[in-house]
Amino acid sequence: MNKTTQLRKNHKAITSQKLIIASVLIGFSAVFLAVSLKKLTEHYEEILFHKANANWFLFLVFPLFGLSVIYFLREYLFKKKENKGIKEIFESTGSPTKRLPVYKIPSHFFNGLLTVIFGGSTGIEVSTVVASAAIGSVAQQKENVFKRHKTELVCAGIAAGITALFNSPIAGILFSFEVISRKISRFYAITITIAVAISYTFILLLDEKPLFEVVITTWHLKAFPYFILLGLLAGVNSVYLTRCVIYIKSKFIEIEKYSTKIIIGSLTIGVSLLLLPQLYGEGYHAVKELFFNAQNLTFSTSFAVTVLGILFLKPIITSVTLASGGDGGVFAPSMFLGAFLGLLVAVILNTFFNANVIPINFMVIGMAAMLSASIHAPFTSIFLICGLINDYTLFIPILVVCLISKTTAQFIYPYTVYTYKPKNIN
């Protein structure tokens, strides 16, 4: 063996050792960040939501306060830079020079928390993803040997964060591949596996419970045509969500004064919450209540008006939340919409067509279908939703419906909120 070959082997060995150490640190940091953000958000969102339910005027006050605090934090603490969500990750991994700076970690952490607990109709998932990606990016900047491994370390942070949020290591791995990286290398496999293993071990030690306590007993083959219908509807509805976000953001960009954006945004959010309190924050409180009552729900005019109002208003209020300065993305809104869409389809089928379908199954499948169509990541959606309920009974129908919803959405509109680029931007 000549000297050059030996040096190359030594270099690879050193790089591998340092990547392993970095992956351990990234995994631990990402899971700590994700769990902290999740716990804080759940705790304070519940408190403030109950306060607003008891005092209706708080539905108007909370969004104004939350968006204003986020604005002042950005102006005086976070270098006057707006958070762009997952597009920031694409910009970083797609360029050899761009980095996710360290201040993006607290920026997304606090802005995501403030957005949701004060009623902004989005979720902390994207805030967690970008903050976790920033952890990986910062680690990459610390060592010269990591120059070629920015994507690997960024994806390690993302995968660990998703694993912690949804109690699903497979969803973490698939999301980092399907949405961010789209390619696999030896170093990629090493960093992702280690970071996810650290994250999942931490979750097991904490004995984290599934977000939704749902009992899935069975599913029937005769329901497959109805599942396909749900997949088609989810694909169409996801395009409505995507187009709302893109359109409303483009209109808010034209508003020069930030104070005007905040006032318009908070008023829109506040009035929507007065009409439909289920839209408050992530909306998981409403989904949990639906799961509890789904089997006993029957079709009525008030039920239909409420659900249709939610399906119409949720994309608008989510878009306004993001356009007026809130931090977040379409993860939680997609799952929220999918649950209500699935329930509506099931209740209509049972009432008017005697289909005898299981409403809870349609809610779970609807959540996966909407998420798959919104982010164009069907396999991530399958394992993510199954991880949320800690049950894989519906794996096969979820797989089929997720592929149908994603294909439908892509056929109607080929972009997601992450991949769309305005025509005036190169």
Image (spheres, rainbow, N blue to C red):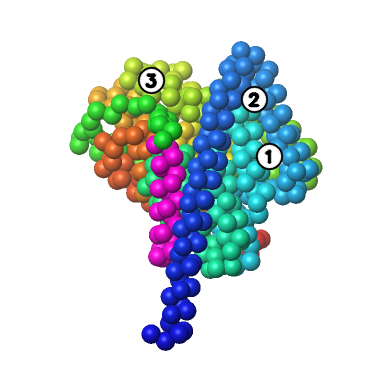
With 360 as the anchor, is 377 left or right in this view?
A: right
Q: Position of residue 322 (x, y in %)?
A: 63, 41
Mark 2 or mark 1, which is nearer to you? Answer: 1
The amino acid type, in three-letter code, at marker 3 is Phe
* 207 in relation to 415, above or below: above
Per the image, the residue denoted by label 1 is: 324
The amino acid type, in three-letter code, at marker 1 is Ser
Could you say whether the residue bearing mark 2 is in a helix, strand or loop? helix
Tell me which numbered mark, 2 or 3, is placed earlier along the sequence. Answer: 2
Residue 276's quadrant in the figure?
top right
Could you say whether the residue bearing mark 3 is in a helix, strand or loop? helix
Q: Main secondary structure of the magenta part?
A: helix
Which residue is found at the position 73% from the left and 46% from the top? 78
What segment is highlighted magenta in the picture? Answer: 179-204
Per the image, the residue denoted by label 2 is: 271
Image quarter hosting the C terminus: bottom right
Per the image, the residue denoted by label 3 is: 292
Q: Position of residue 146 (x, y in %)?
A: 54, 65
Which residue is found at the position 62% from the left and 18% from the top? 52
The residue lying toward the viewer, choosing from 82 and 223, is 82
Residue 288's quadrant in the figure?
top left
* 30 in relation to 355, above or below: below
Q: Is residue 145 visible?
A: yes
CB under 8 Å between discs 2 and 1 = no
Which residue is found at the position 64% from the left and 28% from the top? 118
The amino acid type, in three-letter code, at marker 2 is Val
Tell me which numbered mark, 2 or 1, is placed earlier along the sequence. Answer: 2
Residue 99's quadrant in the figure?
bottom right
